[in-house]
């Protein structure tokens, strides 16, 4: 009887739609899955994430049978009738898994299409459009932050003064929406300071922040509104 070592498939398989999903949503695949599990996504993004996860599962199935077929045909096992039967069965399973993948990919494309058509119009333009994690990122950036690029990997991320790391796709989404701005006169490897724009401050506070150079002639209508105990 043929005995093969167990195959442990990876938890998340890459798909041909990963780049399109990230471009249309402004989030990494990992972030989308995490936000979905936490219930932070709106209905369109939630449907897309579910479709992508289903597609990823199908890709994982293809990988399983492809690797199994490679092991069966590697020459490590005796070539007998049992092996040929096992190979035939694995080929059939691989064909079935591929058909399932193709179906799920079509379903994911159908959900992704409207989001791509709305991009970049779907970019965040107001605080009401931010999901909880994005608003938390904006709030962290308001305390001071820098955009860094790793010299070896080239990966970029935002590190805030409080130590919170903001994923680059989330930062891009905020930047495209005009909520944050970075000092491009500084090199990325040294860190480009990031700050909120006036729109970003309005999103965080709910009202515009007065200029620091303006003389507070009167507190009526100024920000922040005085509390009763300050009277």
Image (spheres, rainbow, N blue to C red):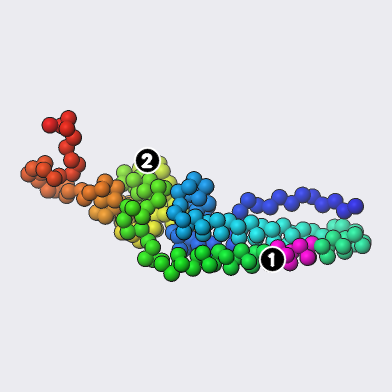
Badge 1 local density, few (<14 within 10 Å), some, or many (20+)? some
- The residue at 73%/67% (across/down) is 95
Which of the pair 174/195 is nearer the observer? 174
- The residue at 51%/58% (across/down) is 47
Kindly report the distance in space between the C-alpha atoms of the residues bearing marks 1 and 2: 47 Å
* Magenta stretch, overall SS: helix
- The residue at 50%/65% (across/down) is 112
- The residue at 63%/66% (across/down) is 103
Q: Secondary structure at mark 2?
A: loop
Q: Secondary structure at mark 1?
A: helix
The span shown in magenta is: 90-98
Residue 157 location (% of width, % of height):
43, 52
Give the labeled residue for mark 1. 98
Name the outermost residue toward the left: 217
Residue 43 location (% of width, % of height):
46, 56
Give the labeled residue for mark 2. 162
* In the displayed structure image, the side of residue 158 where residue 152 appears, left or right: right
């Amino acid at each position: 009887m043929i005995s093969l070592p167990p195959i442990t498939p990876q938890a998340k398989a890459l798909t041909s739609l990963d780049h399109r999903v990230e471009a249309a949503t402004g989030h990494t695949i990992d972030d989308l899955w995490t936000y979905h599990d936490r219930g932070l996504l709106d209905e369109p993004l939630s449907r897309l994430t579910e479709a992508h996860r289903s597609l990823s599962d199908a890709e994982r199935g293809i990988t399983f049978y492809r690797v199994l077929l490679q092991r069966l045909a590697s020459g490590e096992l005796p070539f007998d009738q049992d092996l040929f039967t096992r190979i035939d069965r694995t080929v059939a399973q691989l064909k079935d898994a591929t058909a399932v993948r193709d179906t799920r990919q079509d379903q994911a494309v159908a959900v992704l299409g409207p989001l791509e058509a709305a991009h970049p119009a779907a970019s965040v333009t107001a605080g009401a459009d931010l999901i909880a994690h994005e608003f938390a990122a904006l709030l962290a950036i308001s305390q001071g932050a820098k955009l860094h690029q790793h010299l070896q990997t080239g990966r970029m991320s935002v590190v805030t003064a409080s130590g919170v790391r903001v994923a680059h796709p989330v930062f891009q989404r905020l930047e495209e929406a005009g909520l944050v701005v970075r000092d491009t006169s500084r090199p990325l490897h040294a860190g480009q300071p990031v700050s909120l724009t006036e729109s970003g401050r309005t999103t965080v506070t709910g009202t515009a922040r007065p200029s620091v150079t303006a003389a507070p002639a009167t507190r009526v209508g100024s920000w922040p509104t005085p509390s009763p105990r300050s009277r």
